[in-house]
Image (cartoon, rainbow, N blue to C red):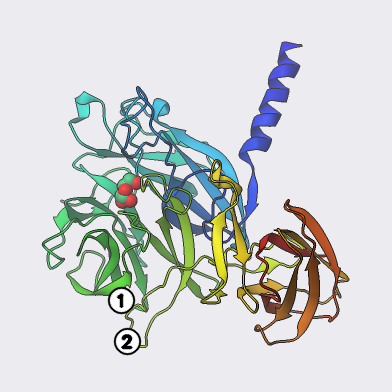
Amino acid sequence: MKKIRLRQVGVICLLLCLQSAMAQNPLIRNMYSADPSARVFGDSVYVFPSHDILATPGHGRVGWFCMEDYHVFASKDLTEWKDHGPILTQTNVPWAKPDGYSMWAPDCIYRNGKYYFYFPATPDSLYGRGFAIGVAVADHPWGPYVPQPTPIKKVHGIDPNVFIDKDGQAYLYWSQGNIYGAKLQDNMLELASEPVIFQDLPAKGLKEGPYVFEREGIYYLTFPHVENKTERLEYAMGQSPLGPFKMTGVIMDESATGCWTNHHSILPVKQQWYLFYHHNDYSPGFDKARSIRADSLSFNGDGTIRKVIPSLRGIGVTPVNSEIQPDRYSAISSRGAAIAFLDTGNRFKGWKTVLSAADAWVQYNTVDFGNKPFKSVLIQATAEGPGELEIHSGSATGPLIATVRVAANGDWKTIKARVSKHTSGIQNIVLVSKGNTPVAIDWIKFE
Ligand code: FUB
């Protein structure tokens, strides 16, 4: 009897952990997440973020970063992200303080059949003060990860990042005021050279979160830096993994919403490069409760990086028969359109788009209509008075796909309307208000 109950609990836990979400930005919709380290393993992209939680008296430092474990998220299409559940917890790391709540930005890399997960944490007093960096090893990206008994020797700091060069040599980077780098031994667990401090980076303003990659023979050292008041993402270019690196430019400007930190990773997936980073979307008033995001990144002909403008639409193609969230828009009219939380008491419920003037519009790009005709569109909407919406493809003046009448209902209703024009393939869709009655839209979906 006891065994059956345990098994049932196990299955329920597994189902709860393996939650998946159709995501734009932010990518993770049911918890805070930060410091995304993204990697391609096999046919999936895995993101290893930090997991921000809110400290309470006796559990972390109230008003500061608070992290007790890591989850890993995976996606085959960059749209649907599956949470594989917790992969490492502070109480399971032999050398870390079990109540440190300081499992900050991690990284993970594959080598010789194993996955090596690097993470910082506050060590037990035996291993010194501040932060140490440890490694946990697994046979699969989703774990189980087994932490090494001690942290890596001669490494004091945060934000580990690992890079394996074309010749097979692995490098570890981290930060502690400055940015450091060293060779790793083949076992990926110990340093193989003395750490170097990268010179020629900005002397003033905090630098942290290094992320190194190589493209067409150029090595990029990228990192958040406080040039003004909060962090922006910058980069330096060099000819080898340990530099010298020459400061080159800015990848992403400071957050418009005032999130003090940013932390990122950069990688190609099927020929397209992406920047994973974080903002504080679900927590506008407290920037230590963050959310990971991703946007496309591209290079100029000389290898310099084009600045990435953060978007809500993010990456990935959205299936037309899923709940499309226009509040994660690609473009929006300058008047009569606004985005707001659905429920300020539970911000994880997401956002709504409010169109409140005639001809106000919101555009959502890269929706996959496939090649079968759709008969109807469903819209989750509400309006105080009678409203009318048009759905166009391409642009606000593009072909009209459907007209939706929203009755004065004062409450959320799923409204069904006939699709008047068949469209196929990947399309941008635009919702246009045809009246001055404010209409709030949660999602739309074709069937
Ligand atoms: O998440 C805690 C710290 O904030 C990270 O380690 C830094 O890179 C910054 O994002």
Depth check: 205 or 219 in front? 205
Q: Mark 2 = which residue?
A: 302
Q: Which picture quadrant has residue 416?
A: bottom right
Name which residue lies at 38% across and 29% down: 93
Name which residue lies at 12% across and 61% down: 204
| Location of residue 206 in the rendering, given as x and y in whole percent from the top left corner | 19, 55
Could you tell which of marks 1 and 2 lies nearer the N-terminus? 1
How many residues crowd mark 1 within 10 Å: few (<14), some (14–19), many (20+)?
some
Mark 2 belongs to which amino acid?
A: Asp
| Location of residue 239 in the rendering, given as x and y in whole percent from the top left corner | 24, 74
Label 2 secondary element: loop
Could you tell whether 198 is left or right of 51 in the image? left
Give the CA separation, mark 1 to mark 2: 10 Å
Which numbered dot is residue 381? none
| Location of residue 252 in the rendering, given as x and y in whole percent from the top left corner | 34, 69
Mark 1 belongs to which amino acid?
A: Ile
Check if mark 1's residue and mark 2's residue have beta carbons within 8 Å. no
**Which quadrant, please, contains the N terminus?**
top right
Name which residue lies at 73% across and 60% down: 322
Depth check: 164 or 25 in front? 25
Label 1 secondary element: strand
| Location of residue 171 in the rendering, given as x and y in whole percent from the top left corner | 29, 56
Q: Is residue 419 above or below residue 3?
A: below
Q: Which picture quadrant has residue 364?
A: bottom right
